[in-house]
Image (cartoon, grey):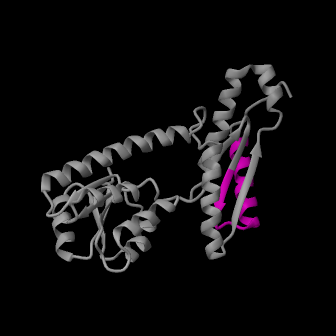
Amino acid sequence: MTTKPVILIVDDETSNIEIMSCLLESEYEICFAKSGARALEIAGPIAPDLILLDIMMPGLDGYEVCRRLKLDEALADVPVIFTTGLDGFEDEARGLSAGAIDYVTKPIQPEILRRRVSNHLEMKRMRDQLANLAMTDALTGLGNRRLLEQHLRAESRRLARCGEWLSVLMLDIDCFKQFNDFYGHLRGDDCIRMVASALRDTLHRPGDFCARYGGEEFCCILPGTDFSGAMSVAEEMRRQVELHAISNAGA
């Protein structure tokens, strides 16, 4: 089942929200906010793929909302298209300087809006694919150290706000150098892949995360898990690796 891209429409005029929703709802999941403050409140939880943002709104205007979105690490890469009645060169330049990726003037031209939304979502999809490749360990398919550090920072900030536990497991393969020396590097790679698979299969909660730290070392992040829970997960991982019965005559 394919999940539709999520578009957040931000506009203080209900009629504008209805027009844009009607044009886009057949292809995308639509969420909306009627103020800049509300947009900032819900953008994180809904994780939109694209934001259509009005400029002239009471309270926080679109420029300020866009600026704040770009300061949020989790939302900085979400493309923002300004939708506004302002059509001067200076207005467009200011919008692009604020971090918007495009600018659509009102009244909305249906085909122009559809095309620009489609084009920017496709570019985002390709950027996301490249980013995913840059964050993935090629041998195991797990996250790499760069993604691990990014994930750890985000989880540390999130859990610090609500005072929940965060456990981190560091694991490595015993006597791996002797294994590599005795069986060769191809068998060594197979061993690392089998261990990675066992670790990944042990984690069942959506928030749990496992990465290859480097060489034969792995790291797992367990949000909302105390010491006792982390030890239980670690023991289950050890047991799952043991089930593979990987012999090491070189040890």
Q: Residue 148, how many percent across, how many down?
A: 63, 49
Q: Is residue 7 left or right of residue 243?
A: left
Rendered view: 196 above or below 224: above
Image side of residue 151 versus residue 89, left or right: right
Decide if residue 14 is on the left or right side of residue 232: left
Does the magenta-highlighted stretch encompass residue 221?
A: yes
Please say if 140 is above or below 82.
above
Q: Nearer the viewer, residue 137 or 153?
A: 153
Q: Which quadrant is home to the C terminus?
A: top right
Exactly how many numbered labels are in the figure? 0
Residue at 76%, 59% in the rendered image: 231
Mark yes or no: residue 80 visible.
Answer: no
Q: Which residues are magenta?
A: 220-243
Residue 204 falls in image quadrant: bottom right
Q: Is residue 144 left or right of residue 108?
A: right
Measuring from the top left, give residue 82's x and y in whole percent.
Answer: 29, 60
Residue 48 in sight here: yes
Q: Residue at position x 39%, y 56% from top? A: 97
Q: Position of residue 89 (x, y in %)?
A: 26, 56
Image coordinates for residue 127, horizontal then vertical, percent? 42, 42
Quadrant in the rendering for residue 19: bottom left
Residue 94 or residue 192, whichever sits in front: 94
